[in-house]
Amino acid sequence: MGECNYCRYTNILEDYEYCPNCGAQLIPAAEEFESEHVKLWGGESRIATIFFVNFISTARDIDRVKLREDAIYITELMNEIENIIKKYSGAANKIIPDNRILGAFGIPRTHRDDPERAIECILEIKNYCQNKMQKDKFVDWHITLGVNTGWVYFGYIVEHLRYLTIIGDTVNAAARLAQISPPGTIYLSSSTYESVSHLADVEFVGERTVKGRAEPIKIYKLIGFLKEKRSAVVSKFPLLAREKEFDKLLNLVKIVKETKKLRMCAITGQMGIGKTRLKEEFKESIAKDSEFQIYESYCAVEIHTPYYPLNYSFVNF
């Protein structure tokens, strides 16, 4: 009997290629790190909030012993930062040679409040690092932080390592913000500030031109949270050119109510065509009907789990 690396299900026979519990592809332990070829699995474009935490040394003369001690200390700090990011359901990439760590919210898992999660997370990271470095008298180093929100492209490049790669102008701008921010300061782009303006206390710094950007970036300094949250302005685009599909979904609901039998429906289409918007409108519609209960589940981007949404729905139902 084998064990699934993802859900830890144990009743797996030797000839199984997929986990019968979660549907993940089973990778033999011996083959886990054998591949030396970079193979593009494919990825997805999505709006995400990205931040960088940079560790900057102010020391001029460093011997080998001190250099090693600093490297160990920074690595320990980055490990704890990674745990903080995961606590807020974000993704973390440690860039150890450059003494910086990337945090991403909105990929691979998406939440409605990803920008808020990112702000709460980076404030906790800032407080943790400053307190610990002061307590340990680690005075030769300081941190700089930058946050940006926008479209990114992400995917898993190395087949068996599950390493999340994130690229795009949004990532580059976040990195530049972290580079130009003063020590112990969090710089936000205008896109991030607009997403959290109802809860974030900021100071407008001005417009700065950064490397790789033709247009200057409006920069805000994050101070903390407002004592009282402002009313967030929620905008929703009207459902356009999907009336026919929406009527089909409503008709399906009518059939289910009349026959009391299961019906299944799949919404397919290219990225950006409006699948999520149609789903949200349909969900809001049936949520008003007391005869229905809504259960929602998603496939995980980082692992292949084709059966998980159905399995989750059936278990909860």
Image (tube, rainbow, N blue to C red):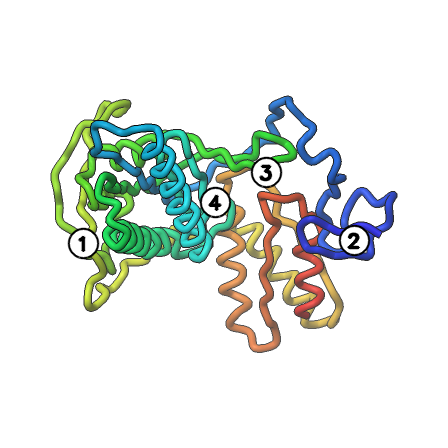
**Dot 1 surroundings within 10 Å: few (below 14), some, or many (20 or more)?**
some
- Residue 219: horizontal and vertical position, in percent? 18, 40
Report the Cα–Cα distance between label 2 and label 1.
49 Å
Give 122 or 117, whichever is nearer the viewer: 122
Kindly identify which residue carries mark 3: 162
Q: Nearer the viewer, mark 4 or mark 1?
A: 1
Please say if 9 is above or below 316: above
14 sits left or right of 250 in the view: right
On the image, the x and y values in percent for residue 192 come to: 28, 46
- Label 1, on which residue? 223
Which of the marked residues, 2 or 4, is nearer the chain's N terminus? 2
Query: Residue sitting at 73 percent across and 43 percent down?
Result: 25
Which SS class for mark 4? loop
Residue highlighted by disc 2: 20
Residue in view at x 40 percent, y 40 percent: 72
Residue at the spot of label 4: 107
Q: Are marks 2 and 1 in contact (CB under 8 Å)?
A: no
The residue that appears at 23% across and 60% down in the rendered structure is 225
Q: Residue at x 67, y 44 (%)?
A: 304
The foreground one among 70 and 92 is 70
Depth check: give the residue in front, 35 or 58: 58
